[in-house]
Image (cartoon, helix red, strand yellow):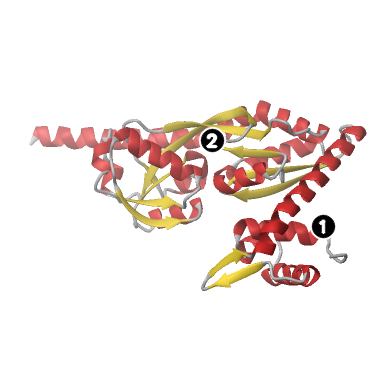
Amino acid sequence: MRNLTMRQLQIFSVAARHLSFVRASEELFLTQPAVSMQIRQLEESVGMPLFDKIGKKMYLTEAGRQLERTAHEVLGAIKNAQDSLAALTGLRAGLVTVALVSTAKYFVPKLIALFRQSHPEIELRITVSNRENLIQLLHNNEIDLAIMGRPPQEMDVLSFPLARHPHVIIASPDHPLAARRRIKAADLSEETFLIREEGSGTRLAMESFFSEQQIQPRRGMVMGSNETIKQAVIAGLGLGFISLHTLALELKAGELAVLDVKGMPMMRTWFAAHLRNKHLSPATAAFKEFIIAQAGPYLDSAFAETSVQVRNKLTRVERQMQGGEAVKAGE
């Protein structure tokens, strides 16, 4: 294994976590052939296959499982060494690795841009995935900070509230429910909902809402991203339960309607989290302090227009309904 490289271990670790070369290439911003080549070279160095492919599914071999454990230990030790050395240099430079749930990609890049204005020499490396994968990244000490909707209770982490996180139910503008006010949750029981994949924080929030309201709507297609759900709702394939922070463009263009459902919006909280015993470099500590201080004010300001659009839409619907009732009374 003398020819093994750290880059190969990094690529293998991501591929082993996803059990997919395609998803590994997307996370690493590499082509799939590049990932396959690095894994093949690693297998040649090890002298054994690391993955088995049975049908369309990929599995780790016994050698792959052992190497995965070793890779986590090696890469975690290197990250700790980097953080310790960075502490000696102060805040002049450094690397911060941040993982986001996919819903956070609608606002975190803007916060990063604001942070870079005052810290241009600090490099930030971003990974976007679902909640389940973020928890695995935290557990393996592969990231400095995770930004998510619900920190893991099963891990020893420190979490810090960042901002309010409203979830709403959306429909196409011509859906019958889009013209109604004060919709009862029970009225959603016969509707079809397009849902996120297992492991998604949005799906957990949706299931929590259904449980609280004691309803079981029909479940349509399972989709792996907010964008796909939005486009499917626009096309009239069903309703969606989604973060309000993902809807600015579609609401402004009039492509989607937020339903006026009693008990909505469902309010959650954005959090930043890291392992309790993790040594934070000065760069990571500075970014954590920045995002804790700035996320709330930024989201309140950036999405104020979206909230106004929702309120105005509901007010117009109510006036139209009152007008219709007045005409009916005059008849």
Q: Going 77% across and 58% down the picture, which residue do you hit? A: 9
Q: Where is residue 115 in the image (x, y as percent from the top left)?
A: 75, 36
Query: Considering only vertical position in the picture, is 297 above or below 114?
Result: above
Q: Residue lying furthest front in this view?
A: 62
Label ID, residue 192: none
**Disc 2 marks which residue?**
150
Corner quadrant of residue 91: top right
Looking at the image, which is closer to me, 78 or 51?
51
**Disc 1 marks which residue?**
6
| Quadrant into which the N terminus falls | bottom right
- Amino acid type, label 2: Arg
- Amino acid type, label 1: Met
Whole-number angstrom distance, CA of label 1 to CA of label 2: 32 Å
Left or right of 127? Residue 243 is left
Q: Going 50% across and 42% down the picture, which residue do you hit? A: 201
Query: Considering only vertical position in the picture, is 70 above or below 84?
Result: below
| Quadrant into which the C terminus falls | top left
